[in-house]
Image (cartoon, grey):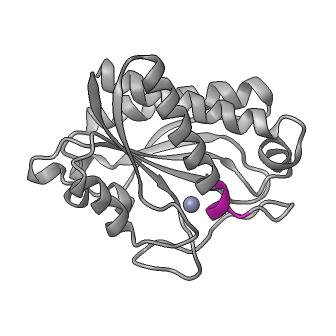
Amino acid sequence: MAIGTVVIDPGHGGTGSIGGSDGNHAVSASGVKEKDLTLILANLVRSALQSAAASGGHTLNIVMTRTTDVNLSLADRARVARTNSADRFLSIHLNGFNKVTRGVETYVRRAQDNVNLNDDKRFARRIQNAVFDVVEGFDTGSNDRGVKGEKFGVLNDVQLGNTSGGNCRACLLEVEFLDVPAVDVLLNTGPNASAVRNGIARAIANAIIEDLVNP
Ligand SMILES: [Zn+2]
C-alpha cells in the first residue's frame, strides 16, 4: 500500500550562506562538520526507510533535498516538500553551543503561524522519542530536551504548501550537540559510532512510518 511521500532535508551544505541556510554550523572536536554528518545520517535514514517500508509491505516515495555537498536556501528546501506534495518533512541538524550543553531536541513551527500545530507536534514527539531512546541507550549523558516551538524558515507552512491545501507534517531534529567531546566519541570516533548512527536512522525511519500509518 502506498503510504506517502517523505522529504528528508540534510541541514546546511556547500560553502557560504544562502537564503538563511549557513554552509555549516557545528563542528566536532575531531573535525566532523555538521553539514557532512547531516548528509550521512539522511542517507542512512533513506536506506532505513526503504528497508522498513519494504518489510512492512508499504510503498513509500522518498525525496532528499540534497544528495551532495551543496547548500540550498531554506525556502528551496521547503519547496521540495511542496512540489512533491510531501506528507512528512524532516530536517536533520546537529547542535553546537558551548561544548558542554547536551541533549536531543526537535522543533516545530511556532504556534501563531502553524496551520497544523498539533499534527506537527505529534510527528515531532515520535521523532524526538525515537532518537533520544537510541542515544540514551548508548550514552546516559544525553538529555531529552523535548519538542520546542521556533519560527525556523525551513518549517514555514507557506513554503511547505500547507496553506495552499497541502498536508505536510514537518519538524526539525537536532540530534545532539556535535561540539561536545563526548558526543564526538558517541557519533564519530568511538567504537559504537556506526551502531549509533544506524540505530538513530532506523529509529527515525520507524517513527516516520508509524506516523504515516497511525496519524
Ligand atoms: Zn544546523
The location of residue 113, given as percent across then percent down, is 22, 53
Q: Is residue 60 left or right of residue 16?
A: left
Q: Residue at x 57, y 28 (%)?
A: 203
Camera-side residue: 149 or 90? 90
Image quadrant occupied by the N terminus: top left
Residue 140 in sight from this viewpoint: no
Q: Residue at x 81, y 49 (%)?
A: 188
When the figure is inspected, residue 112 is found, relative to residue 36, above or below; the finding is above
Q: Is residue 14 magenta?
A: no
Q: Residue at x 37, y 60 (%)?
A: 154
The location of residue 172, given as percent across then percent down, is 46, 48
Q: Is residue 166 left or right of residue 90?
A: left
Image quadrant occupied by the C terminus: top left
Principal SS element in the magenta part?
A: helix
The location of residue 53, given as percent across then percent down, is 43, 25
Range drawn in magenta: 33-37
Camera-side residue: 140 or 192? 192
